[in-house]
Image: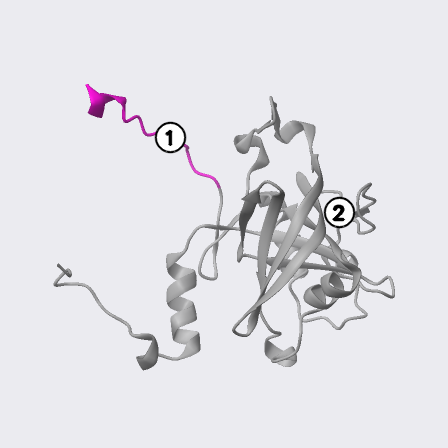
Amino acid sequence: MPRHDALAFHTSDVSEQEMYKLMIGSVVPRPIAWVSSKSKDGVLNLAPFSFFTVASRNPPTLLISIGPGVGEREGTVKDTLTNIREVGEFVINMVSEPLGEAMLLSSANAGPQKNEFELAGVTPQLCKSVDVPAVLEAPIAFELKLDRIIPVGGDHLVLGIVERVQVDSAAYAGNFKIATENLKPLASLAGDFAGLTSTFSIDLRHRQE
């Protein structure tokens, strides 16, 4: 039975932007994939995407969703998508709280010849499994080979198979676990950001007694 105080928004009655705002304000918090890529001419690119998740455990696969350009580049194909499509390799760097400002700087609508590593003031680090650099300052970096690109409306789902993972020793808890409290992941909200608050567990054992 529907709640009496609930508001209902039908897709046919609202604009694309209005529905987008409802979605990004509701599906929170979202991790940020700070994607480094390289053009076929060797120009480095770095850009953040918050439509990001794990797609498969075997083969280990990560997923990002890339929309069209906005602002001055509205309707164009983003450099990240072009680079991944043409080169077939990319790196997803995890954003920690101290890297928030650099991440935002890299989100500027720069031209395809602009190196966002320089714009953000971060350091390219050579990878061993792909010919695309990671962000040296990032606590975790996933080196990926392109699996497939799936068009969904005006966006594109990009699936990448993990070839290698770099984890800073401070963010590693041993036994292949991440020390989340040291990782200090930055999450995307609806225009704002959030850090990690106190964690807690939910124990259901008492429900079985």
Q: Where is residue 159 in the image (x, y as percent from the top left)?
A: 62, 55
Tag 2 residue: 134
Q: Which of 36 and 184 is in front in this view?
A: 36
Q: Distance between the residues labelled 2 and 1?
A: 32 Å
Left or right of 153? Residue 174 is right
Element at badge 2? strand
Residue pictured at 66% horizontal, 39% vertical: 140
- Quadrant the C terminus occupies: top left
Residue situated furthest front in the rendering = 58
Quadrant of the image occupied by residue 88 = bottom right
On screen, 135 above or below 25?
above
Which amino acid type corresponds to the residue marked 2 in the rendered image? Ala
| The N terminus sits in image quarter | bottom left
- Crowdedness near tag 2: few (<14), some (14–19) or many (≥20) residues, C-alpha within 10 Å: many
- Residue 134 x/y as whole percent: 75, 47
| On screen, residue 7 above or below 51 | below
Dot 1, how many residues are within 10 Å of its Cα: few (below 14), some (14-19), or many (20+)?
few
Q: Which amino acid does label 1 sit on?
A: Phe
Q: Quadrant of residue 147?
A: bottom right
Magenta extent: 196-209
Q: What residue sits right under mark 1 in the picture?
A: 200
Mark positioned earlier in the residue sequence (2 or 1)? 2
Chief SS of the magenta region = loop
Residue 75, horizontal then vertical, whole percent:
61, 80
